Structures are given as C-alpha cells and as structure tokens.
Amino acid sequence: MALADSATPDWSTMVVQGPAEATGQRGRTWYEWSATTEAKVGNAL
C-alpha cells in the first residue's frame, strides 16, 4: 500500500482484476487477483 501512511482507502473505487492463471515452479496452477483503490490523504498534524 503505497499511500497507507495517514491515508484512508475509498472502498467505493475498488477495482478487482483477475483471476490470472500462473504456473508455479513445481508445475502447480495458481490463480492471482489484484486490486486497486483510491485513497484520501488526511491532514498532517
């Protein structure tokens, strides 16, 4: 979370992508998702 310090996520903007299929080193299949959201930065103290 790049803006986790003193920021609040705006969950209404969350976008989930996936699943993306990936093959691991041992040949197992994995499914990966990624999510992004905007954040509101609070006032500095």
Image (cartoon, rainbow, N blue to C red):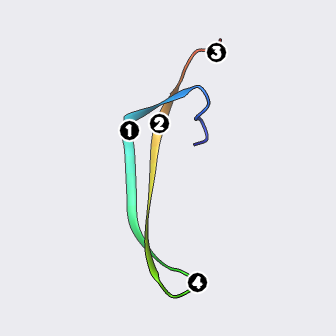
* Residue in the image at 46% along x and 47% along y: 36
Determine which residue is flagged by label 2. 38
State the SS at label 3: loop
The disc labelled 3 sits on which kind of residue? Ala
Determine which residue is flagged by label 4. 25
Determine which residue is flagged by label 1. 13
Instruction: Check disc 2: other Cα within 10 Å, few if <14, some if 14-19, many if 20+.
Output: some
Instruction: Measure the alpha-carbon separation of dots 1 and 3.
Output: 23 Å
| Image marks 2 and 1: residues in contact by CB distance under 8 Å | yes
- How many badges with numbers are in the image? 4
First-in-chain label (2 vs 1) = 1
The disc labelled 2 sits on which kind of residue? Glu
Instruction: Measure the alpha-carbon separation of dots 4 and 2.
Output: 34 Å
Instruction: Check disc 4: other Cα within 10 Å, few if <14, some if 14-19, many if 20+.
Output: few
First-in-chain label (3 vs 4) = 4
First-in-chain label (1 vs 3) = 1
The disc labelled 1 sits on which kind of residue? Thr
- The residue mark sitting in front, 4 or 1, is 4
Instruction: Measure the alpha-carbon separation of dots 2 and 1.
Output: 6 Å
* Residue in the image at 44% along x and 75% along y: 30
| Image marks 4 and 2: residues in contact by CB distance under 8 Å | no
Image position of 13 with respect to 43: above or below: below
Determine which residue is flagged by label 3. 44
State the SS at label 2: strand
**Quadrant for the C terminus in the image:** top right
Between residue 24 and residue 43, name the one nearer to us: 24
Residue 32 image position (x, y, % from top left) = 44, 66
Instruction: Check disc 3: other Cα within 10 Å, few if <14, some if 14-19, many if 20+.
Output: few
Image position of 14 with respect to 22: above or below: above
The disc labelled 4 sits on which kind of residue? Gln
Between residue 13 and residue 23, name the one nearer to us: 23
- The residue mark sitting in front, 2 or 3, is 3
